[in-house]
Amino acid sequence: MSEGRKRKAHSAEFKAKVGMEAIRGLKTLNEIGQQYGVHPVVVGHWKKEILERAATIFEGKRGPKPAAHGDAPRATTGQRCSAANEVIDAA
């Protein structure tokens, strides 16, 4: 075997940057590959992976809603009406 170049390990941030530039479509995959020193086929793979996984960003459930005024439970409409009637009767 020849003693050629070793494989490069690119960070996730680098892959996202290059893939997003490919998605924008302002340059060809060849131009992007030359700019970043990556083979155009690899740029295409990163672009494809970003597009395939984009929908999963929004699949997660929403977190719990924060309480408006602390952790106290809210009164029901009937309880609020009863309390209002008691205030009116007391007056």
Image (tube, helix red, strand yellow):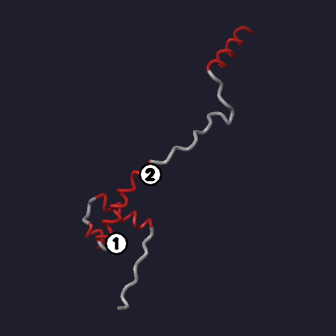
Q: Is residue 7 left or right of residue 76?
A: left
Camera-nearest residue between 45 and 23: 45
Q: Is residue 31 left or right of residue 12?
A: left
State which quarter of the image contains the C terminus. Answer: top right
Q: Circle 1 sits on which residue? A: 36
The amino acid beneath tag 2 is Ile
- Quadrant hosting residue 76: top right
The amino acid beneath tag 1 is Tyr
State which quarter of the image contains the N terminus. Answer: bottom left
Q: Residues within 10 Å of mark 1 (few under 14, many from 20)?
A: few
Residue that sits furthest to the right in the current view = 90
Q: Circle 2 sits on which residue? A: 57
| 79 versus 60 height, above or below | above
Q: Is residue 29 left or right of residue 17?
A: left
Residue 14, given in percent of the width and then of the height, sits at 41, 67
- Quadrant hosting residue 71: top right
| 1 vs 2, front mark | 2
